[in-house]
Amino acid sequence: MDVNNLWGDRVREFWNEAIRYLRLLGNSGFMFSLYALFIAGGYFYPSFIEWLPEAIPVSFILAGVFTYMLTKCPLRTFLKEGDLVFLLPLEPKLKNYFRNSVLYSFIMQSIAMAIIFLLLGPLFQDRVNEDSGYLYSVLFCILVANLWNYASFWAEARIQTETIRNVHVVARVVINAGLTTLLFHNAAFWYPAAVFLIMLFVYLFYYYPLLTQHLLKWELLLALEQKRLSIFYRFVQSFTDVPHVKAGVKRRKWITSLTDSFIWKNNSVYKVLFGKAFIRSGEYLGMYTRLLVTGGLVMYAFPNDWFRLGVALLFVYMTSVQLRTLWHHLDVMMWPDLYPVSISNKQLAFRHIAKRLLLFQTVLLSIVYGIVGSAVLPGTLVLVIGLLFCYFYPIFKKDRGVT
């Protein structure tokens, strides 16, 4: 095995496959929805900045956003399950492989952070500092801090105990929060400089020795890689079949305790399975919540009532597209195929779950409009069109094998 070219081969293999899926996304209605939302957002952005009340702590919100992004450190190593057997003996020869992985992850995250920061640039200049030089200086500081976080995270990944790793994450949150708060509050130069000195000191005298004191935790690296792949492929699966997606499970006791009494009262095994899958598996609940919250915030942020109508319907449609992944969730399990239940029961159960989730979102977005909107007609249309969409939802799924 040529370990010198292994990293490049893995990256090319992934992107050759990913590009094929991204082309499907580019031709989909979901991407058109994102384009429409982006164009509308750009049109109303100046009005939003002018409308945004002075009482809203923009500096703290921006600091919170970038503290989260700095601490998160998504890592791509392109490891596969067989590597735990075949590559483990070659670990001393894989230093360049893992160094390239960390550098690649840092660059990709830095690009994402730079894009988000520049999109928020007009808001930054309006509420924090209008000087363009200060804007780019803050961006540079954030990218340097991102490098420190990745270097520190790579050292943390060698720690065996999850509890201790979480303590390190909390410590990085504190440091990142201190830095971003100073940057977004026009602090004097030497205050952020002092934080960077602390970062350098912590890395040199604490994190760097960890690299030699502990071995790589291959199981953790593989789990992180599978998590990143799962997020990407579950999103892609909304538009096409991805047979090698693996399901993750989170127990979520507090939601289960609230929903079990409703789920188990249904005389349908598939209603139970789809209900449990939505709550506990993968990214379904997180996706649903994010779209609901984002839709409500966008409706609150922009003053035009007809735009709010379009946003509400757009986010209901986007949720319906993302829920299509749930239909295929059970395909990777052999046990449902052994149940003495016809495929029509599965179809009815899926429609039952999907309709009620869309109905609940429609009602909540209608309530949001009732709170922030002023015209009666757009608010009525949000509810009426949303309910019609929920009722006729199966006709939008002929290409997915549900009807």
Image (cartoon, rainbow, N blue to C red):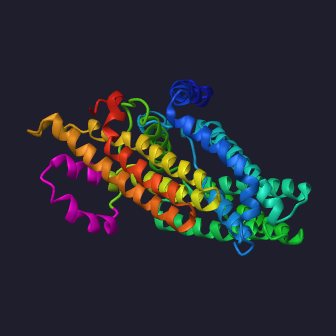
- Queried whether the magenta region covers residue 262, the answer comes back as yes
Q: Nearer the viewer, residue 32 or 281?
A: 32
Spot occupied by residue 203 in the image (x, y as percentages of width and height): 71, 61
In the image, residue 277 sits, relative to residue 193, either above or below, namely above
**Residue at figure coordinates x 51%, y 26% from the top left:** 24
Along the horizontal axis of the image, is 388 left or right of 373? Answer: left
Along the horizontal axis of the image, is 135 left or right of 93? Answer: right
**Residue at figure coordinates x 21%, y 50% from the top left:** 271
Spot occupied by residue 69 in the image (x, y as percentages of width and height): 64, 56
Spot occupied by residue 323 in the image (x, y as percentages of width and height): 38, 44
Residue 92 visible in rendering:
yes
In the image, residue 129 sits, relative to residue 41, either above or below, namely below
Could you say which quadrant of the image residue 260 lies in? Answer: bottom left
Range covered by the magenta-colored residues? 252-277
Along the horizontal axis of the image, is 333 left or right of 161? Answer: left
In the image, residue 212 sits, relative to residue 202, either above or below, namely above
Q: Nearer the viewer, residue 328 or 4?
A: 328
Residue 209 visible in rendering:
no
**Residue farthest along the left direction in this orientation:** 340
Q: Main secondary structure of the magenta part?
A: helix
**Residue farthest along the bottom direction in this orientation:** 55
Could you say which quadrant of the image residue 148 lies in? Answer: bottom right
Could you say which quadrant of the image residue 57 lies in? Answer: bottom right
**Residue at figure coordinates x 71%, y 44% from the top left:** 111
- Queried whether the magenta region covers residue 72, the answer comes back as no
Spot occupied by residue 357 in the image (x, y as percentages of width and height): 35, 53
